[in-house]
Image (cartoon, rainbow, N blue to C red):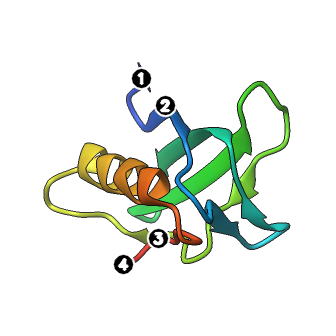
Amino acid sequence: MSVSERRLVADVRAGPGGVMTDEVGVVTGELTVAAEELPDGGVAVTVQYAGAEEWYTVTGSPVPARPEGLAAVHEEMLARVRRGGGATVRG
């Protein structure tokens, strides 16, 4: 996992049914997931095919920040991606 002050990034293999994105629908396979704190206090969650340049917004993003911090949002999203089923972000 890559960590910066306001952004967490990790590679993960999507479970069956992948992740739902706003731009292209479902993405599957080896993915990179990022969670980034926004200036307004929310958290944006994006995904890309591992090694690709384009990022896609995970459906349901952005979400409000959590008291547990950015890592909690990121870890929960990674777990959802591993499960698949058209995973989305929940607030």
Question: What residue appears at the point 31 percent right and 64 percent down from the top-left corner?
Answer: 65
For mark 2, give the secondary structure.
Answer: strand
Mark 1 and mark 3 lie on one chain; the one further toward the N terminus is 1
Distance of label 2 from label 3 (alpha carbons): 16 Å
Q: Which residue is mark 3?
A: 89
Picture quarter with the N terminus: top left
Along the viewing direction, whichever of 11 and 16 lies nearer the viewer: 16
Local crowd at mark 3 within 10 Å, few (<14), some, or many (≥20)? many
Mark 2 and mark 3 lie on one chain; the one further toward the N terminus is 2
**Residue 44: image x %, image y %?**
53, 59
Q: Which residue is mark 1?
A: 1
The amino acid marked with disc number 1 is Met
The amino acid marked with disc number 2 is Ala
Distance of label 1 from label 2 (alpha carbons): 4 Å
Task: Specify whether residue 9 is in view.
Answer: yes
Distance of label 4 from label 3 (alpha carbons): 7 Å
The amino acid marked with disc number 3 is Val
Left or right of residue 63, residue 33 in this image: right
Q: Which residue is mark 4?
A: 91
Q: Are marks 1 and 4 in contact (CB under 8 Å)?
A: no
Picture quarter with the C terminus: bottom left
Mark 1 and mark 4 lie on one chain; the one further toward the N terminus is 1
